[in-house]
Amino acid sequence: MGKTGTTEKAGQPAWAKRILKLLEQAKAKDPDLMRFGAYSHKYKLSAPASEETIQKFEEQEGIRLPEEYRDFLLFVGNGGAGPYYGLYGVEVEKKELHDSHGSRLYRVQEEPVIYPKMSDEEWDRVADPNGMPGTGRRKGEERHPYVGVLPIGSQGCTLMTGIMLAGPYRGQVVYYDEDLCGQPFFVREKGFLKWYERWLREG
């Protein structure tokens, strides 16, 4: 899909127009693209995704996207400008969930096992279930630490931005390390849109 800074869609809600206006303002404040990651996305968004595209992705992965994030894809943009190196569109997300042979890396539709302010012991248990005694799991029953988390952007190297797909923190953005070098960090906003708007206003 082509990219634009101010893509509008028929029936676009007022909140979406507000976000696009804030994006234009953020771009105007950073003409030399000095903000971290800006040179990658250049404050441009891909055209919004169609309902059919999103439904197909959800059906293939066995998930239902959180409503705020889903609406962003539908009415604002299918990836592009965003914190760090920007946001993925659904096409990139498909690749992130599968290896080069098309096999699923982990079951994104499962109930998440991470949560805010985990103890070091609990994180160690989740990150390495085989290495911790008393987990109650037999070999082969391990769960990937990031089940229930959809990757929505890269922060560079193995650091990722994700969104919780289920459980009490559904819809909340979380930062995590694919190499499991530290605990995940849950942002303070409960929903995707307030997190995205904070990034726009802080620019």
Image (tube, rainbow, N blue to C red):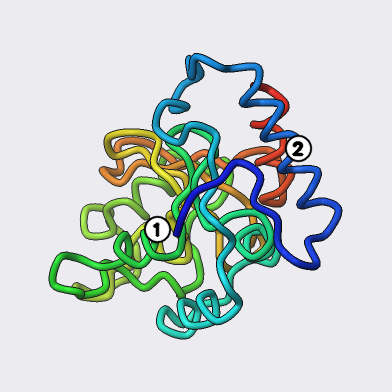
Three-letter amino acid code at disc 2?
Lys
Residue 30 percent location from the top left of the image: 58, 17
Mark 1 neighbour class, 10 Å CA radius: few under 14, some 14 to 19, many 20 or more: many
Residue underneath mark 2: 21
Local SS, label 2: helix
Camera-side residue of 77 and 144 = 77
Q: Is residue 149 left or right of residue 133?
A: right
Three-letter amino acid code at disc 1?
Tyr
Query: Compared to 148, does 198 lie above or below?
Result: above
Camera-side residue of 11 and 94 = 11
Mark 1 or mark 2, which is nearer the start of the sequence?
Answer: 2
Q: Is residue 171 left or right of residue 144?
A: right
Quadrant housing residue 51:
bottom right
Q: Is residue 150 left or right of residue 157?
A: right
Residue that protrudes farthest toward the left in the picture: 101
Residue 158 percent location from the top left of the image: 29, 39
Name the quadrant of the C terminus: top right
Asked if the residue at tag 1 contacts the one at tag 2, i.e. Cβ–Cβ closer than 8 Å, the answer is no
Residue underneath mark 1: 146
Residue 167 percent location from the top left of the image: 61, 67
Mark 2 neighbour class, 10 Å CA radius: few under 14, some 14 to 19, many 20 or more: some
Camera-side residue of 188 and 116 = 188
Query: Compared to 80, does 199 lie above or below?
Result: above
